[in-house]
Amino acid sequence: MIQYTPDKSSIDELLEKLGDYFADMPASEIMNPNILTMPKDRTLWHTKELMRIRKISGVPIIDSERRLIGLVSIEDIIVALEKNLISERIENHMTNKVVTVAPDEALTSIVAKFNRYRFGRFPVVNSKGVLVGMITKKDIIGAILERFRLMYVHDARRKSALEGSTDWFEKSLISGDYVEKSSANFAFNIDYTDVDMVGIGAAELKKYLIANGLDDKSVRKISIATYEAEVNVVIHSGSEGTIYCWLEDGGSVKVRVEDTGKGIENIKQALKEGFTTASDHVRELGFGAGMGLSNMRRCSDKMMVMSEVGKGVVVEMIFELQGGK
Amino acid sequence: MTVNELVETCGFLLVSGDDKDREIESGYVGDLLSDVMGNAPPKCIWMTVQSHQNIIAVASIINAKVVLLCNDRSFEEETLKKANDVGVTLMKTPLTSYEACIELFKAGFNEKGAARSVE
């Protein structure tokens, strides 16, 4: 079977490295549920057109109950063209023996299938034989990133930050070192019970930074980003939170805002400008414009967010000061 | 442009803040706080219909010099108190934000208002 993965080697390498951390992730979490299919009574020509127009290299074939009965790959199309069968019905010329994945099948097993069969994609089929999704390597990468809650991929040091599932509460997301919260130059406990108090922490931090002689531009960026993180804790977390700030040697500032609340359900959506889960009440107050995270990303030089539903959110941001302190 | 000129030329009402010589250098219109956070230039006049106390935190963080409350709304008590604490000038007008911009423009204030940067 032909594979269309131009950056194949780098994807394979990444999968190998990351696979271990997410070994138990089920197919249902990885798969793309929105897939293009073809009913078995259409012709191969229809399939070819679908593949051409939508730029895909394989189409699952289903019966009237959405049960998977086969797959048409580019290879099948080439053979059909050669033998002049292109106007015939799909069901007579498709690949019948399709290797599938169950919705609860774990990532390790899926990765093993990719390595063993060298196919570009695997259909996900439930116990009734119904097609529920497809998995390509890209989907795996996407799912890993999703679970990572990873917005900023730093470098190899990140590896150590990821060991253990919720260990990231104690470690720096960016450097991977254990965070000594007691060593923070500035700490502020966020009162999440009072929307009116939002911004006090960021304002206090601003005062502190000015008092320490940081330049105006940097102070502004740090305060804006911190404000947004603080707003998120108050509006969304439903838990207490803390702002930490370190003035680091070498002219950078690290801000870490953490809470132990609800967590972010869908980081993809959360990252979209304009998306918000804020209530009508707080939206009326002008919050929940859906720009908080993007403001944070724009103001900071490095940023990483980790979250797990029900366990909270940790945001870490690094700001490089212009011309040092 | 100074606060005094805003009163004299544009007809905005000074609600809180003693510094009549305070200078504004640009302007921004916005009612979504994150939008204002992300886009309002420093030393600006911020035109909004939000009147609750959170606007003071926003104004102070982005270093807005004046908050102009439009549509004839009134500032909440707490907002006034906080504005005094952090030194943000509060003004109001019956005009809409759009009409207030026109007044600023007519007063010759059209140089930097369009600046859109966090810098």
Image (tube, coloured by chain):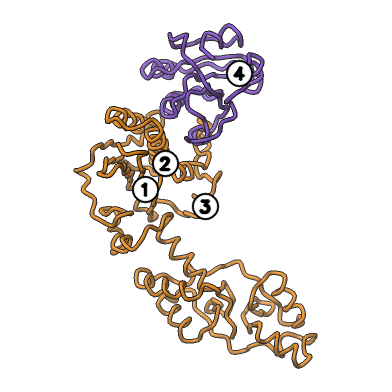
Chain colours: A orange, B purple
The amino acid type of the residue labelled 2 equals Asn
First in residue order: circle 3 vs circle 2: 2
Residue reaching furthest to the bottom: A83
Are the residues tagged 3 and 4 within 8 Å (C-beta)?
Answer: no
Q: Is residue A301 above or below residue A108?
A: above
Mark 3–mark 4 distance (CA, rounded to whole Å): 39 Å
- Tell if the residue under mark 3 belongs to the same chain as the one under mark 1: yes
Helix, strand or loop at mark 4 = loop
Residue receiving disc 4: B109
Residue receiving disc 1: A315
First in residue order: circle 3 vs circle 1: 3
Which numbered marker is on residue A232? 2
The residue drawn where x is 75% and y is 88% is: A81
- Tell if the residue under mark 3 belongs to the same chain as the one under mark 2: yes
Other residues around mark 4 within 10 Å, as few (<14) / some (14–19) / many (≥20) = some
The residue drawn where x is 50% and y is 45% is: A277
Helix, strand or loop at mark 1 = strand
